[in-house]
Image (cartoon, rainbow, N blue to C red):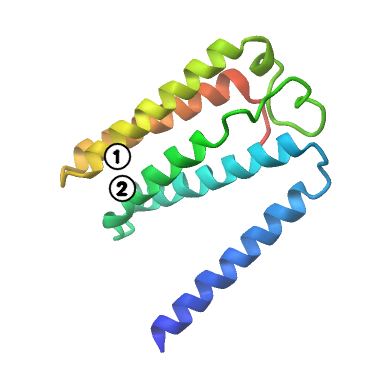
Amino acid sequence: MNVILKTFAVLALSVASAATAIAHSSNEKNPYIVHRQGIYQVAGGHINALKAILMLGHPATTDINYHAKAMLEAFKHHGNAFPSGSDKGKTHAKQNVWTDAEDFKQHGQDAGKALMALIKASESDDMKLIKSKFAGVGKSCKNCHDEFRKKGSH
């Protein structure tokens, strides 16, 4: 019975989160903006799960590898999410995403490398190493946000 209640609670939270995300982006009509924001929401969910495990003590340590791989996979799909013209609408991206595309691409590659290092570390039982690599992921995300994301956007 307890498992059923937990499953229901998780399902209810998932539906509520999805509804909130859909409501938040429903006014946006630029498909590129909606697409990339959805991908970043997915990645953000996985980084929050990793934070819960690695920093807040959630016991699901066997899920570290899954969440790191899922983030990397999400980032792989943002690919062409910033074509010319996709700055028209409610975007969190600064203009330099388009004007300095090579630097933006490098930040993305840095995040990918940090995630691959976390994935590799997660295959060990060395929590100190895993936390260190997780910090590297956080740093790569922060560096990109500082450089390419408008202040105050969530």
Q: Which residue is mark 1?
A: 119
The structure residue drawn at horizontal position 74% and vertical position 20%, both measured from the top left corner, is 84
Q: Horizontally, is 65 left or right of 98 in the view?
A: left
Amino acid tagged 2: Asn
Per the image, label 2 sits on a secondary structure element best described as: helix
Per the image, label 1 sits on a secondary structure element best described as: helix
Residue 79 placed where, x, y %?
Answer: 57, 29
In space, the residues marked 2 and 1 are separated at their CA atoms by 6 Å
Disc 2 + disc 1, Cβ < 8 Å: yes
Amino acid tagged 1: Ile
Q: Horizontally, is 30 left or right of 9 in the view?
A: right
Q: Horizontally, is 26 left or right of 64 in the view?
A: right
Q: Which residue, as the protein is rendered here, is positioned at the far left?
A: 125
**Mark sitting earlier along the chain (2/1):** 2
Quarter of the C terminus within the rendering = top right
Q: Which residue is mark 2?
A: 65
